[in-house]
Amino acid sequence: MNFLVLAILMGALYAFMIVPQQRKMKAHRALLDSLAEGDVVVTNSGIFGAIAEVEGNVVWLEVAPDIELKIAKSAIAERVEDTDEYEDEEQDDEDDEELDDDADSTNLVDEAD
């Protein structure tokens, strides 16, 4: 009787913990194998970028115009389907730079008085 309870518990453990984890690992491996240049992805650390180049286990990730990061392919968490969000962030960064430039010119005028 005790053996039957132990077998049921082991089966439940396998069904509820191990199988879903194996599926998740398989899906992540398929994602990494399907990455191509131009895909917008997010890394495990939360960095968004577009793939500029894939070299084996290394990915060059463009995070801003003319700025690329060399990362391990396994550091990519997911592909971002809504690329408008990524482009909006780039536009916000450009707007922030314009505001900074305006603020700097305002400070120069104030200092001249």
Image: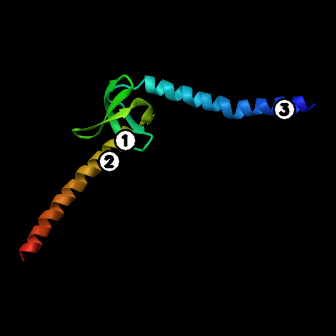
Q: Earlier in the sequence, mark 2 or mark 3?
A: 3
Q: Nearer the viewer, residue 26 or 96?
A: 26
Q: Nearer the viewer, residue 27 or 2?
A: 2
Please name the residue that numbered disc 2 is placed on. Answer: 89
Q: Amino acid at mark 3?
A: Leu
* Dot 2 and dot 3 residues touching (CB under 8 Å): no
Q: Name above or below for residue 8 compared with residue 108.
A: above
Q: Earlier in the sequence, mark 2 or mark 1?
A: 1
Please name the residue that numbered disc 1 is placed on. Answer: 48
**Which is more foreground, mark 1 or mark 3?**
3
Please name the residue that numbered disc 3 is placed on. Answer: 6
| Horizontal and vertical percent position of residue 62 | 29, 36
Kind of element beneath mark 2: helix
Q: Amino acid at mark 2?
A: Glu
**In the shown orientation, is residue 63 left or right of residue 15?**
left
**In the shown orientation, is residue 43 left or right of residue 4?**
left
Kind of element beneath mark 1: strand
* Dot 2 and dot 1 residues touching (CB under 8 Å): yes
Q: Earlier in the sequence, mark 1 or mark 3?
A: 3
Q: Nearer the viewer, residue 95 or 11?
A: 11
Q: Alpha-carbon neighbours of circle 2 within 10 Å: few (<14), some, or many (≥20)?
A: few
**Which is more foreground, mark 2 or mark 1?**
1
